[in-house]
Image (cartoon, grey):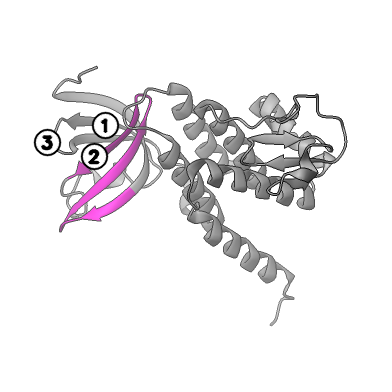
Amino acid sequence: MQRERVYQTEALVIRSMDYAEADRILTLLTPGGKRRVIAKGIRRPTSRKAGHLGLFHRARVMLAKGRNLDIVTQAESLEEFEGLATDLLRFTYACYVGELLDRFAQEEEEIPSLYKLAVSTLRRLSTEEDLPIWVRYFELQLLRTAGYQPELFVCVECHEEIRPQSNYFDPEFGGLLCDRCGPVQPQAVAVSLNAQKVMRYLYRHSASEVGTLHVGSATHAEVESLLHAYLEHILERKVQSVDFLRRLRQELRQAQRQPNQH
């Protein structure tokens, strides 16, 4: 549908790149899809837009249709997710979420549910304590919204119901393989029963129920590895923020182990 020359939308800033002397090119996720726009003069100290269009801010924006990129003419901040700005780990998880949103969202493809998922996820990353579980929940809901949900209930090869035991997961097949079909597939990896239960729970249950879930570190690491492999298979590229996120978490763990020295 053709847009008016000047139009208004709510938007999340999921990517920001400096351009020319004082401009920024912003990637916005809106209820009407993804849009790349230019905010002219936003890096000048006198710019009125600067405080309203920070990375991961939710804002109401007025856009004018441009030749190549639409132009931000006005912006009003609606939500800044303050917890992300003051905590490096929270901000890094947000960067990972933003990268996935940028990869999966299509230009001007209307998926209001994806926008709602993005906003609710950033709120949780800004305030909740168990960040990894909310990122796993986001990944599975993102895959469902984009039409790539992994099969977690029947074997993707023989279509028999998955039994409650150790089975296999193959990103190329798109889900779980039973204990008979899995061993003959070279890319399939063994999956513990606990990891299967966690993925099913996150897939089936609401956010309010997920908030009460407690997952052991080993099981969580297993689920994270499986979902990362599946996401990268679908995207056909590496998710760049994963390596930095892993290094940061390792450094934070090491710092916590070191005794206080006075």
Residue at image mark 1: 61
Judged from the image, the secondary structure of the residue bearing numbered disc 1 is: strand
Q: Give whichever of 15, 239 is nearer the camera.
A: 239
Res 67 label: 3
Judged by depth in the image, the label closer to the viewer, 1 or 2, is 2
Residue at image mark 2: 37
Judged from the image, the secondary structure of the residue bearing numbered disc 2 is: strand
Q: Amino acid at mark 2?
A: Val
Judged by depth in the image, the label closer to the viewer, 3 or 2, is 3
Q: Is residue 165 left or right of residue 233?
A: right
Q: Residues within 10 Å of mark 3 (few under 14, many from 20)?
A: few
Residue at 15% of width from left, 38% of height from top? 68
Residue at 20% of width from left, 44% of height from top? 39
Tell whether label 2 touches label 1 (CB within 8 Å).
yes
Tell whether label 2 touches label 3 (CB within 8 Å).
no
Q: Is residue 33 magenta?
A: yes
Among the 4 quarters of the image, the one containing residue 158? top right
Is 31 drawn above or below residue 231 in the view shown? Answer: above
Q: Position of residue 124 (x, y in %)?
A: 57, 38
Point out the stretch of residues depicted in magenta. Answer: 16-39
Looking at this view, name the residue that lies furthest to the bottom: 262
Tell whether label 3 touches label 1 (CB within 8 Å).
no
Looking at this view, name the residue that lies furthest to the front: 184
Residue at 54% of width from left, 50% of height from top? 93
Q: Is residue 206 magenta?
A: no
Q: Give whichever of 79, 193 is nearer the camera.
A: 193
First in sequence: mark 1 or mark 3? 1
> Distance from label 1 to label 2 (Cα)?
11 Å
First in sequence: mark 3 or mark 2? 2
